[in-house]
Image: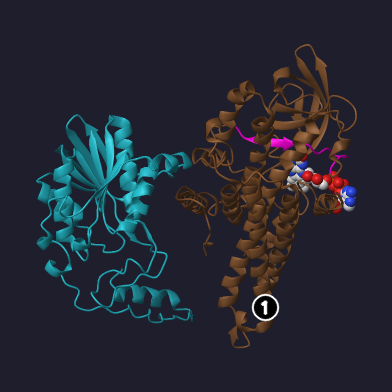
């Protein structure tokens, strides 16, 4: 069931058609196999790049698609409805381009950004560390100035696309305190850089999440993005946008779960009638539909504020909280609608439920979103 | 090289398709219009020929005004320009009339190669390429799964029950293609943006010097007299295996002349 979307332009409608077509053929057909076998979808990101889907929210002058967030996020939603792991990696790629696109010098942008936005190279975002998750400011990884650049030492954790990405937006310490963190556009391969074994996760099996061990690798000084010490500011402003991406991915997951549940409830009969015609279950489905629609409305509201140049940090946190909680509830209820079948791997509902869980955790746990929202309120 | 690819908009096969009760033509409003699937392969082949030999790819579509969606898609894939033949007088035209109308346009715009899909998913006549070739007095190379051009010679390969035929002709020519021929590309987002700026020429029946009396439902050579919804499939025969299942299945296949 294709979602009927309100889109601002004909080109946006054509873009969503392209996205659905691409996602039906390239994602929906492969997702089960790769999520089951935990294998990386070789070549898929190159295809996403060729189709123009990896630089959508960045300006055309920089090689991006020049699309408003309102449109870009709906593309992510469609991707996530077929394959959450891929949609999340697309969102993280967009996040990893943010520091350079927003804080880089013209020279830095000209040098690296076109290939990044065309998807010729894929990015990861490396902020978290084993002991510094929610409290990102407690990160320890060091970037020490040496003659030719910065020598990086320390351990980063939880990197989506770790070991596979071609570059990382890396946050490391050049000084002390919250003003002592800097942002680098680090290469994906370097002497003295190794990656841990992929984490054994509950879901998102096709895309590796790894740690990175920086053992004195030296990166060129022109890979510093923004000023020394500006890192956390860059990291958090990137996350405002990234959270919207996660909100959209969560909404896509919820939509996919709703679709499966509705289809099933219209076919399955018990006590002589379709289970959707038992009011107790019909109302469960109604609540699921209401949760999906309100999730979409919430992230689109935040996106439109961003597109209009208005402050949107609080709205992005609200969207992340509302959409990911909706995804958890809707996917859990979808398993319920399918009964025992829902608990098996013969149907995708259990996968959606496993995938939804992470959306409440990364890019700021939902506790942290509440912290952000309440701080906005107490100002 | 001047390559023209004929593209048709058809009702989405994924939705319920209907005939109009009044004039028994396809209800093009009832279902969403999409590009006829085999036409995507024709566009892809046209683009590959252009990439190999240079020239220009023109999309030619006859259809109602909403067929612009389908034209845009072909342009987004990479075609250079489009001609849209649109006129109420064309409504209800059958295969013969459609081939006449398209041939008039093709004579006007000129061509070295005309490429078409082998059939459309709505009418499923599969005769347009042959009719067009006849009207244009050009050789017809039908059901190609491979196309090669060498100077003014065009060669195709056609899959058959016994292997394949090699067919050769000189340009200009009309080629129809089957789905095995290639893997159509996605219209990239850059292509979508570029398509907005590509020229689409709209022609009426008069513009294309088509005799209005020769097209449309009233003068069609074929007539849909009646139609009915296909009856639901009857329940199959269930063979219970009581040790003789294999024999019974073989007997069934023999009775249907499969073995
Ligand atoms: C699959 C996956 C992919 C990831 N991808 C990336 C990536 O690409 N890049 C990256 O940098 N990171 C990534 N992460 C890391 C992710 O962002 C962190 O896991 C997350 O920020 C939480 O940090 P933590 O795991 O250390 O939990 P902790 O911060 O230790 O939190 C534990 C619990 O305490 C709660 N808590 C913590 N502080 C507070 C507080 N002040 N008030 C109330 N409750 C609090 C949290 O909400 C949580 O419930 C990924 C994680 C996973 C699992």
Around disc 1, counting alpha carbons within 10 Å, would you say few (fewer than 14), some (14 to 19), or many (20 or more)? few
Asked if the magenta segment contains residue A124, the reply would be yes
Foreground: A59 or A94?
A59
Q: Is residue A136 left or right of residue B152?
A: right
Q: What is the quadrant of residue B92 in the picture?
A: bottom left
- Measured as percent of width and height from the top left, residue A128 is found at 80, 39
The chain identifier of the residue carrying mark 1 reads A
Q: Is mark 1 within 8 Å of ligand 1?
A: no
Asked if residue A2 is positioned above or below residue A214 in the image, the reply reads: below
- Please indicate whether residue B163 sits to the left or right of residue A258 in the image: left
Which residue is identified by label 1?
Answer: A283
Magenta residues, start to end: A121-133
Magenta: main secondary structure equals loop
Report if residue B255 lies within the magenta region. no
Q: Colour of chain A?
A: brown
Of residue B203 and residue A274, the one placed in the foreground of this image is: B203
Residue A205 at x, y = what percent?
Answer: 68, 49
The residue shown at (76%, 46%) is A363
Would you say A41 lies left or right of B5 here?
Answer: right
Name the foreground residue: A290 vs A280.
A290
Q: Is residue B16 visible?
A: yes
Residue at 68 percent of width and 53 percent of height: A247
Q: Colour of chain B?
A: cyan
In the rendered structure, the answer to whether residue B174 lies left or right of residue A144 reads left
Q: Position of residue B125 (x, y in %)?
A: 22, 62
The relative height of residue A26 versus residue B243 in the rendered view (above or below) is above
> What sort of colour scheme is used for the picture?
by chain
């Amino acid at each position: 069931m294709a979602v009927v979307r309100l889109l601002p332009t004909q080109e946006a409608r054509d873009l969503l058609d392209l996205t659905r077509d691409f996602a039906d053929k390239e994602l929906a057909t492969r997702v089960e196999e790769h999520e089951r076998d935990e294998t990386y979808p070789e070549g898929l990101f190159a295809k996403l790049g060729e189709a123009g889907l990896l630089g959508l929210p960045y300006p055309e002058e920089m090689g991006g698609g020049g699309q408003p967030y309102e449109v870009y996020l709906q593309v992510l939603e469609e991707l996530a409805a077929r394959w959450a792991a891929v949609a999340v990696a697309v969102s993280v790629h967009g996040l990893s381009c943010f520091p350079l696109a927003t804080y880089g010098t013209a020279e830095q942008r000209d040098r690296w950004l076109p290939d990044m936005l065309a998807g010729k190279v894929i990015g990861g975002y490396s902020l978290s560390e084993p002991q510094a998750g929610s409290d990102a400011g407690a990160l320890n990884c060091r970037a020490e100035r040496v003659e030719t650049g910065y020598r990086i030492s320390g351990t980063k954790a939880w990197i989506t696309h770790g070991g596979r990405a071609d570059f990382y937006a890396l946050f490391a310490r050049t000084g002390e305190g919250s003003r002592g963190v800097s942002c680098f556009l680090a290469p994906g391969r370097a002497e003295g850089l190794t990656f841990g074994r992929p984490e054994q996760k509950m879901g998102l099996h096709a895309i590796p999440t790894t740690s990175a061990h920086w053992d004195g690798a030296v990166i060129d000084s022109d890979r510093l993005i923004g000023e020394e010490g500006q890192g956390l500011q860059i990291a958090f402003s990137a996350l405002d946008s990234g959270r919207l991406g996660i909100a959209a991915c969560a909404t896509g997951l919820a939509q996919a779960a709703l679709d499966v549940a509705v289809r099933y409830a219209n076919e399955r009969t018990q006590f002589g009638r379709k289970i959707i015609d038992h009011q107790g279950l019909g109302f469960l489905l109604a609540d699921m539909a209401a949760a999906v629609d309100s999730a979409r409305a919430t992230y689109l509201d935040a996106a439109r504020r961003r597109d209009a140049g208005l402050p949107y940090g609080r709205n992005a946190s609200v969207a992340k909280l509302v959409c990911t909680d909706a995804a958890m509830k809707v996917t859990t209820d979808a398993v319920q609608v399918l009964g025992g079948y829902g608990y098996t791997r013969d149907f995708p509902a259990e996968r959606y439920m496993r995938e939804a869980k992470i959306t409440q955790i990364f890019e700021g746990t939902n506790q942290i979103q509440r912290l952000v929202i309440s701080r906005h309120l107490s100002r | 090289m001047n390559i023209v690819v004929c593209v048709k908009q058809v009702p989405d096969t994924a939705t319920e398709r209907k005939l109009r009760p009044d004039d028994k033509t396809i209800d093009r409003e009832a279902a969403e219009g999409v590009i006829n699937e085999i036409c995507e392969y024709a566009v892809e082949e046209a683009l590959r020929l252009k990439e190999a030999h240079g020239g220009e790819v023109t999309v030619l579509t006859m259809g109602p005004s909403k067929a612009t969606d389908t034209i845009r898609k072909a342009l987004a894939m990479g075609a250079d320009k489009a001609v849209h033949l649109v006129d109420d007088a064309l409504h209800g035209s059958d295969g013969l009339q459609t081939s006449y109308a398209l041939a008039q346009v093709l004579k006007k715009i000129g061509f070295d190669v005309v490429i078409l899909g082998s059939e459309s998913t709505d009418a499923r006549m599969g005769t347009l390429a042959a009719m067009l070739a006849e009207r244009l007095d050009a050789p017809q190379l039908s059901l190609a799964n491979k196309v090669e051009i060498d100077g003014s010679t065009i060669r195709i390969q056609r899959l058959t029950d016994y292997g394949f035929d090699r067919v050769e002709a000189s340009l200009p020519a009309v080629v129809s293609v089957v789905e095995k021929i290639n893997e159509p590309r996605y219209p990239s987002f850059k292509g979508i943006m570029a398509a907005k700026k590509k020229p689409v020429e709209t022609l009426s029946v008069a513009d294309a010097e088509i005799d209005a009396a020769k097209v449309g439902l009233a003068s069609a050579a074929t007539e849909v007299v009646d139609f009915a919804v296909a009856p639901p499939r009857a329940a199959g025969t269930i063979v219970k295996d009581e040790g003789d299942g294999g024999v019974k299945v073989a007997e069934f296949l023999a009775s249907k002349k499969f073995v």
